[in-house]
Amino acid sequence: MVYPEINLQSGVPLYQQLKRSYHRMAALGLIKPNEQLPSVRQLAMELGINPNTVQKAYRELEQENLIYAVPGKGNFLADHETDKRVEKEEILYHFQAASRVAWIAGISSQTLHDMLDGCLHGNRQKTD
């Protein structure tokens, strides 16, 4: 079972971190449609957080139609096509972060393009 990532030192509320993490895991295919999520109590214990925080995140994820609840059984990832908007936002976020690091490191645009092409074709590129 895959657990969401949270950062207890972050200024972002934990329930929002949980929601963001579940959106990310769903977009990346780390959890599959109709896969059962950890129970509120189990997840709270695993992450060392209050069960009410997990319950709030699950409730909002259900309102967003990312998950559904089956009384007496638990919560499951909804069986619908992954929200491509969330997936694209996640990819763009990582591209922007990598671009900032490359710019600070003095990597040229061409080298960055070559690195991306190498990643897409399964080749590792040197950063020169």
Image (tube, helix red, strand yellow):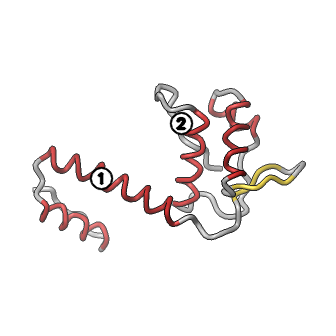
Q: Element at badge 1? A: helix
Residue 116, percent across and down? 25, 65
Residue reaching furthest bottom? 121
Residue reaching furthest right? 72
Q: Amino acid at mark 1?
A: Gln
Position of the C terminus, as image quadrant, is: bottom left
Q: Please, is residue 82 above or below residue 53 in the view?
A: below
Q: Nearer the viewer, mark 2 or mark 1?
A: 1
Query: Foreground: 123 or 62?
Result: 62
Q: Please, is residue 28 above or below residue 8 in the view?
A: below
Residue 52, percent across and down? 73, 30
Crowd rating for badge 2 (residues with CA inside 10 Å; few <14, some 14–19, many 20+): some
Q: Amino acid at mark 2?
A: Ile
Crowd rating for badge 1 (residues with CA inside 10 Å; few <14, some 14–19, many 20+): few
Q: Please indicate whether residue 18 sits to the left or right of residue 122 in the image.
A: right
Residue 100, percent across and down? 23, 47
Residue 66, percent across and down? 66, 56
Query: Foreground: 73 or 57?
Result: 57
Q: Element at badge 2? A: loop
Residue 54 location, quadrant? top right
Residue 35 location, quadrant? bottom right
Query: Foreground: 3 or 78?
Result: 78
Q: Please indicate whether residue 52 sits to the left or right of residue 98 in the image.
A: right
Real-space CA distance between mark 2 and mark 1, rounded to the nearest whole angstrom: 21 Å
For label 2, the residue is: 6
For label 1, the residue is: 96
Earlier in the chain: of badge 2 and badge 1, it is 2
Instruction: Give the residue drawn at x 69%, y 33%.
Output: 44
Instruction: Give the residue drawn at x 66%, y 34%.
Output: 46
Q: Please, is residue 69 above or below residue 104 in the view?
A: below
> In the rendering, which numbered label is found on residue 74?
none
Instruction: Give the residue drawn at x 76%, y 42%.
Output: 39
